[in-house]
Image (spheres, grey):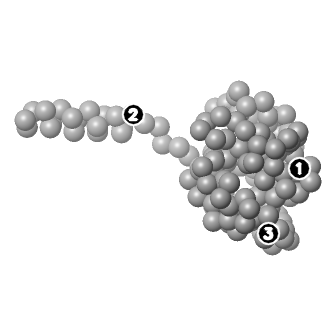
Amino acid sequence: MKKLLFLLLAIATISCANQEKVEYNKTVIDEEENVKMLVGYANREGFNQEPFKEWFDENYDGYTVNDSLAELIKPEVKDKTLKLFMGTWCSDSQRETPSIYKLLDKIDFDYSKLELITLDREKATSDSLQAGYNIDFVPTLIIYKNDNELNRIVEYPIETLEQDLLKILRGEDYKH
């Protein structure tokens, strides 16, 4: 019994050691503008550093969530996951990403169900995190249920963020 326990512990230790540690909020220099940009996996904490903090806070504070639509979104999004591709260099991403976060905050979204991937100007990462997702414009917010894509909001909402998201979550006709 001790040998079996030792063997299982050894396998678990080796398995954990072999797993890659995900690096979040990696910055590189945007050679076109000679400023920092986030590239790769990111999270909200990445927007707390300069030069991202200024535009993130300004656009977050400037966005007014439609409370009545947010209440309708809240139960619809509980069993969904989101993947957000954005570029910190992109004015559309700088405008829309803080709005998305403000709406998600309003509905108490479980952020473990959001994957944020920041892209360079070629809409790529060094480890091709964008591969297979057909990202032509940023930001692109993809909504999933059971790992199946329901739809996506590309670059900017057609009506409003809340209206577009609610249509997608309810399975209504929506074309980005």
Question: Disc 1 marks which residue?
Answer: 156
Q: Please, which residue is most extreme toward the left here?
A: 1
Give whichever of discs 2 and 3 has the lower sequence position: 2
Name the amino acid type tagged 2.
Asn
Q: Horizontal placement of 1 versus 19: left or right?
A: left
Disc 2, SS: helix
Q: Horizontal placement of 115 versus 60: left or right?
A: left
Viewer-side label of 1, 3: 3
Question: Disc 2 marks which residue?
Answer: 18
| C-alpha span from label 2 to label 3 | 47 Å
Name the amino acid type tagged 1.
Tyr
Dot label at residue 73:
none
| C-alpha span from label 1 to label 3 | 21 Å
Query: Can residue 112 be seen here?
Result: yes
Q: Position of residue 75 (x, y in %)?
A: 65, 59
Question: Between 168 and 13, which is closer to the camera in this rendering?
Answer: 168
| C-alpha span from label 1 to label 2 | 40 Å
